[in-house]
Amino acid sequence: RIAKTSEHIKHVIEVKIDLDSNPEFTAANLVAYARACVKMNQRSITGVYTALDVRPSDLSPKSRAQLIKEML
């Protein structure tokens, strides 16, 4: 992703992923989004959503309090 903050100032963000097991990574993501669906359903949120509509905290098995303590 390339962005500019000023006319002549640009910034580049690059993401690299190196997987030992693509199937395991894919399965972990599917499980995380299934977990998010359950959490959303418990809040009576139903319907069709994209990955951008899902709260990052819903993807984790940890509680909100645990995530705040460990990540902030």
Image (cartoon, rainbow, N blue to C red):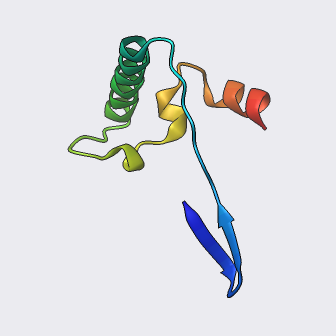
Q: Position of residue 13 (x, y in %)?
A: 63, 55
Q: Is residue 24 left or right of residue 61?
A: left
**Which quadrant holds residue 22?**
top left
Residue 6 vs 41, above or below: the answer is: below
Q: Position of residue 45 (x, y in %)?
A: 31, 41
Residue drawn 48% across the image and 32% down it: 58
In this view of the protein, which residue sits in the foreground, 41 or 32? 32
Residue drawn 73% across the image and 34% down it: 68
Residue 54 vs 25, above or below: the answer is: below
Q: Is residue 42 left or right of residue 3?
A: left
Count of marks overlaid on the render: 0
Residue drawn 79% across the image and 38% down it: 72
**Which quadrant holds residue 48?**
top left
Q: Is residue 67 left or right of residue 40?
A: right
Q: Position of residue 54 (x, y in %)?
A: 41, 42
Q: Position of residue 7 (x, y in %)?
A: 68, 88
Residue drawn 34% across the image and 22% down it: 30
In this view of the protein, which residue sits in the foreground, 11 or 66? 11
Image quarter in which the N terminus is found: bottom right
Residue 50 vs 43, above or below: the answer is: below
Q: Is residue 52 left or right of residue 8?
A: left
In this view of the protein, which residue sits in the foreground, 50 or 9? 9
**Which quadrant holds residue 12?**
bottom right
Q: Residue at the left extreme?
A: 47
